[in-house]
Image (tube, rainbow, N blue to C red):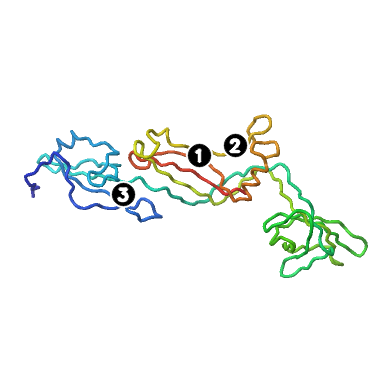
Amino acid sequence: MSNVYEDSDWSVAAATGGKRWLRPFPETNANFIFEQDYLQSLASFLTAAVALGTFHPTDPGFYLIEESTPTDLGGGMVRFTRTYSQIPAARKMYESFAFTFPGMETGTFYTANTVTGNTATTAGGQTTMSISGGAAIATGDSVRIHYNAFDSVQQYSRYVIRTAISGGGTLVVPQIVDTLDSAPLYFFTAQKIELGREPRTETVSSILTYDYFLPGVSSGVDYVTDIGLVVKDIIIDSDGVQTDTYTDATSPAISDYREQVSNGDLLVAEDSVVRIWRGPILERVTRYVKAK
């Protein structure tokens, strides 16, 4: 059966049927991208050559990002599909990532606290002691504990490192046990320390941030080169050479990195990448991991 058309001006593309809303991102069902079918005379379609990035005639917040190859319907008419989208809002995704954390050359030892009465109690897999003086110890801090252990002949001086379960004047740490336990352990000090380390690679949770731009429309972005890139921090030693380990003499210094760890700051794990998302809309992707 042949196609039948009304007597009309087909020099301008005419929408046929309703909008079909799409779901390009699995984490949202927001309506910001749709496709729609159009009819037009073949000659006018070829002459018009509507550019990608052109806004929708009745929905100016939506921009043309794709146009299908026209289907010849006969009689000089064609049908085609146009896809329009708003500039997507920034979004985040999460995935595992193997990241090499920087080294820290030397550990920092803070002023030692005295263990009151040189005693501690152990119960429920934890050791609890009262401490005073010295540098404050908070939950999560690394603590070096100095004690003596006794056997039937002599005593031995020991040091162990634990992570504080709770701090303040009453220090609680995972249980301290010793093979020489013929007498109660005799505790001297509990001292907060910042542990040094070599660079190490760990598989951790990472955050991927996605930002979207349409040159000529997005504020401050007229060209692709106007999209700012987020880059990884680098460590420079005292000779001006890039290194992978923080020290007191590097820039940034080890104290700056320890502050990032303490604040739970995010590190740039990979330099930003800018790529085409759909049509003229560009996507910037940046990966972050939590400092540790």
x and y percentages locating residue 75 in the rendered image: 9, 41
Residue at horizontal 42%, vertical 34%?
226
As shown in the figure, which amino acid type bears the numbered disc 1? Answer: Val
Q: Amino acid at mark 2?
A: Ile
The Cα atoms of the two marked residues, 3 and 1, are separated by 27 Å
Comparing 67 with 292, the one in front is 292
Left or right of 194, for residue 269? left
Q: Amino acid at mark 3?
A: Ile
> Looking at the image, is mark 3 or mark 1 earlier in the sequence?
3
Dot 1 crowding, Cα within 10 Å, few <14, some 14–19, many 20+: some
Return the mark for residue 290.
none
- Structural crowding at the residue carrying mark 2, measured as other residues with C-alpha within 10 Å and reported as few (<14), some (14–19) or many (≥20): few
Is residue 234 depicted above or below 62 in this figure? above
Q: Give me the residue at 41% from left, 39% from top.
A: 275
Q: Which residue is mark 1?
A: 230
Q: Nearer the viewer, residue 164 or 4?
A: 164
Q: Given the current orientation, which residue lies at the most extreme top position?
A: 239
Label 1 element class: loop
User: Which image quadrant for residue 235?
Assistant: top right
> 35 or 115, which is in the foreground?
115
Identify the residue at horizontal 23%, vertical 48% (top origin).
Answer: 36
Say which element carries label 3. strand
**Would you name the residue on which mark 3 appears?**
33
Residue 140 image point, x, y percent: 67, 57
Numbered circle sitting on residue 234: 2
Q: Residue at x 60, y 44 (%)?
A: 100
